[in-house]
Amino acid sequence: MEPEKLWKSVLGELELAVSPTYYNTFFPSTKITKIENESIEIFCQNNVSKEILQQRYSKDIKKLIKDRTGQEFDIIFTTKNSVDQGKFITDAPLFGNKNTSTVREQDLEQSRHTSTNTPLKETVSNGLVKEYNFQNFIVGPNNRLAYTVAKTVAENPGNSYNPFLIYSGVGLGKTHLLHAIGNEIFKNHPDYKIVYCTGQEFLNDLMEALQNTRTNGGTIRDFKKRFTDIDVWLIDDVQVIAGREATQEEFYFAFNHLYLSKKQIVLSSDRHPSEIKKLHERISSRFNMGMVADVQKPDVDVRTAILRNKREDLGIDIDNETLDYIANNINSNIRELEGAFTQVVTYAKAMNIKANISAAKQALNNSIVTKEEKNIKPNKVVREVCEYYHLETREVKGPRRTKEVVLPRQIIMYLLKEINQLPLMEIGVLLGNRDHTTVMYGIGKIKSELKNDNFKIKKDISIIKEIILDK
Ligand code: ADP
Ligand code: MG
């Protein structure tokens, strides 16, 4: 079948399956550009479209192509200017890879703070914090879509995704991205009027203006003017305006005005617009007109990358092992991760010791012990490991010694020692009456894999631990 016909037929079916907004945004201009023995290359118009197709539709596309050709192809998505992409940390193993620069852009333009205290953020005249930029934003599976859209918006304000709304839990990078967009636009268009404000500031200013209107008159008009006479509006934590009548009214007015004049609007919220209670439907539906992207909690790779980046930026002497320890143990959010890093460094400095793993253990004693204190039941460890590897618990307790069972069994041994601090004998009994020497061997095996930077096992264990300690 000709590539063109094949793709047309695939698109025909996708169009029926995908929501129209998605289809019209991401699928037009896609085409098959190469078919080789086992792979098909699909051209996407831009990075966002590429990311979306790759993340959400590659399986479907693969299947639809197989239905039509009878052959299983690898699907490769590309864009014209793929050299311009940010550097993502998708598959690159981080552990044992000394060159952390693969995950960040090289051009650090600013001189960095060397202080280990929370640095005073330097703001430029428009209220933007210079240190929140794209160069020091680590991209991973958890935030790739938000990052890619943010970059696109910054390169083409008002003309790509408008409005653009980022939502996530606390400390996951919304404010950072909003400022990064503002800073980037400011760099390219110093004449643009860029306004950054939080929903709370908007609300407070309005209240003040309303108050002044009663006393002096006139200032509500100034207020209106302030939020309509701009090129880029960045509103952080917009959810706070919900439930406030006057505020939503004014917000709606400003929003519409800017939107209709094709001015870029970027918002952040702590949840999806449809989940914000008491937010007027007409406002939430406007948020959905452009692009909505979420940011998830970072996995251990991203957390490690963030810490390594921070170490380089601040020029601090702290080894990989210690950073891994912090990254493995602090999984709530990035703000806390950064806080833990600062704690360790400050602690080591104050005690005049090296910032190594033992210093980290001492400094973070409280935050980490509380997690491990949680009195986790040994059976839970067995269950979660089995679930992770799709095994029945009776399989790890049984006699089988194939690879698929042995590794999970040894990981269970290792975790029962590490988390539950069970004696070897007890671990043996729990795992189908195995001898304590077998348990000792198993734990040793896992330890040596970890020591040798077995990336896969390191990651598996880290994820399993997260599941066990989180629940
Ligand atoms: P939010 O606004 O979602 O609560 P912030 O943007 O304030 O979160 O992020 C909290 C801290 O984590 C900030 O210091 C920010 O620079 C940092 N941070 C968040 N995401 C990243 C990332 N992907 N790479 C580097 N630093 C990040
Ligand atoms: Mg914030």
Image (tube, rainbow, N blue to C red):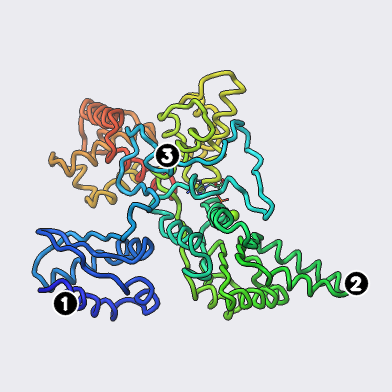
- Residue 210: x and y in percent read 81, 72
Give the secondary structure at mark 1.
helix
* Mark-to-mark CA distance, 1 and 3: 45 Å
Contact (CB < 8 A) between labels 1 and 3? no
For label 1, the residue is: 5
Of mark 1 and mark 3, the one earlier in the sequence is 1
Residue 368 makes an appearance in the image: yes
Up-down relation of residue 425 to residue 254 (above or below): above
Ligand 2's image quarter is bottom right
Q: Quadrant of the N terminus?
A: bottom left
* Mark-to-mark CA distance, 2 and 1: 70 Å
For label 2, the residue is: 216
User: Closer to us: mark 3 or mark 2?
Assistant: 2
Q: Which amino acid type corresponds to the residue marked 3 in the rendered image?
A: Thr
Report the disc number at residue 304: 3
- Residue 263: x and y in percent read 58, 70
* Mark-to-mark CA distance, 3 and 2: 55 Å
- Residue 319: x and y in percent read 44, 27
Give the secondary structure at mark 2.
loop
In the rendered view, does 208 fall on the left or right side of 455?
Answer: right
Contact (CB < 8 A) between labels 2 and 1? no
User: Closer to us: mark 1 or mark 3?
Assistant: 1
